[in-house]
């Protein structure tokens, strides 16, 4: 088993650990790096967990705001393009699986089963709730640890695959709307992008409605219909996952809470504990996500 340190050069796709039938890795790419726009076809069957926000467009598909509230799913050979949202470029962690394991996960989650042998993943994305987000981070950090256990990583990654596929197929079924036109999708994407880049501000519904070019009522209704969650819940989750990125032994939690847009330290702590089952101070003390 081999653990790899966070790369110093931002423009790398790096294998962290090969654990049985699972590979675990990370991609870090700045906006100016040649790999940012096009890093070539996907080489494995992947579940990717963004650690910041970037726009992803699959070949033949529509643009998706990929942020830490979502998992991106890729079949081998999938071609796609990136466009910038975050000034940090693209930062994500990935889990690569064997085709048979992906197909089995899809069969368990859907009576329809995989759409084809070569492309078993029928959807490009799915929501990631707080529990799944916390779990995949724990599995990734186990893989990146010099003392990590390969068996535990492999089993944990397959559980992540199972839950990510279930969530993605459930989301696709619940939010599919053949009458949702491009302009409505673009309004929701505008709100997602605004939150991705301005989550530390005290955003109001009126602010976001102006960004989307429609009324408060319309954007609140449209956002929930298309994403399955409210704007406020989405904003809170983006803030909490940004907190994960910034928890180090030296983090001032009170300062962080205000930096992320929470009204108080206690509000931040309460929201974090409800989402992840642990307080920010406990995660900071454990130094689990560095």
Image: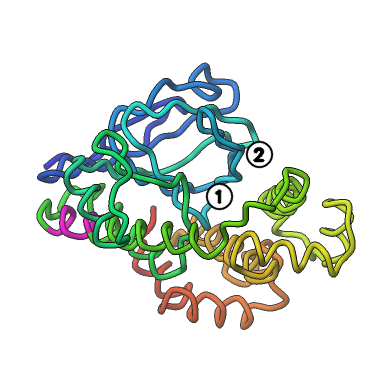
Counting from the top left corner in percent of width and height, residue 58 is at 51, 32
Question: Residue 85 bears which disc, if any?
Answer: 2
Magenta portion: prevailing SS class: helix
Residue 206 in the figure: left or right of residue 19:
right
Label 2, residues with CA under 10 Å away: few <14, some 14-19, many ≥20: many
Locate residue 27 relative to residue 160 in the image: left or right. Answer: right
Q: CA distance from mark 1 to mark 2?
A: 10 Å
Q: Nearer the viewer, residue 72 or 184?
A: 184
Q: Quadrant of residue 18?
A: top left
Q: Position of residue 119 (x, y in %)?
A: 31, 37
The kind of secondary structure element at disc 2 is loop
Residue 137 visible at all: no
Q: Which residues are magenta?
A: 152-158
Residue 136 or 167: which is nearer the viewer?
Answer: 167
Residue 67: mark in rendering: 1
Q: Percent from the top left, x then y, of residue 42?
A: 36, 28
* Disc number placed over residue 104 in the picture, else none: none
Q: Secondary structure at mark 1?
A: loop
The question of residue 114 being in magenta is answered with no
Left or right relative to 182: residue 43: left
Quadrant location of the N terminus? top left
Taking 60 as reference, is 171 above or below it?
below
Q: Are marks 1 and 2 in contact (CB under 8 Å)?
A: yes
- Find residue 236 and report its horizontal and vertical position in percent: 62, 68
Q: Dot 1, crowdedness within 10 Å: few (<14), some or many (≥20)?
A: many
Q: Earlier in the sequence, mark 1 or mark 2?
A: 1
């Amino acid at each position: 088993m081999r653990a790899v340190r966070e790369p110093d050069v931002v423009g790398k796709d790096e294998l962290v650990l090969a654990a049985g039938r699972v590979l675990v890795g990370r991609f870090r790419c700045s906006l100016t790096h040649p790999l940012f726009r096009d890093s070539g076809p996907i080489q494995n069957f992947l579940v990717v967990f963004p650690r910041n926000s970037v726009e992803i467009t699959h070949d033949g598909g529509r643009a998706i705001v990929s942020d830490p509230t979502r998992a991106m799913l890729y079949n081998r050979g999938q071609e796609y393009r990136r466009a910038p949202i975050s000034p940090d470029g693209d930062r994500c962690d990935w889990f690569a699986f064997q085709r048979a394991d992906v197909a089995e996960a899809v069969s368990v989650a859907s009576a329809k089963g995989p759409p084809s042998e070569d492309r078993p993943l029928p959807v490009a994305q799915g929501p990631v709730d707080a529990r799944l987000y916390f779990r995949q981070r724990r599995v990734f950090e186990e893989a990146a640890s010099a003392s990590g256990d390969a068996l535990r990583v492999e089993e944990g990654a397959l559980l992540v695959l199972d839950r990510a596929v279930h969530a993605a197929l459930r989301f696709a079924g619940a939010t599919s709307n053949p009458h949702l036109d491009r302009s409505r999708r673009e309004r929701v994407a505008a709100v997602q992008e605004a939150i991705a880049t301005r989550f530390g501000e005290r955003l109001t519904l009126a602010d976001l409605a102006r960004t989307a070019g429609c009324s408060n009522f319309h954007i609140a209704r449209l956002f929930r219909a298309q994403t399955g969650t409210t704007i406020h819940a989405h904003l809170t989750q983006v803030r909490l996952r940004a907190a994960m990125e910034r928890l180090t032994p030296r983090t001032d939690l009170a300062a962080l809470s205000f930096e992320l847009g929470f009204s108080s330290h206690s509000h931040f702590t309460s929201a974090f504990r409800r989402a992840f089952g642990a307080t920010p101070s406990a995660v900071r003390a454990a130094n689990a996500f560095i």
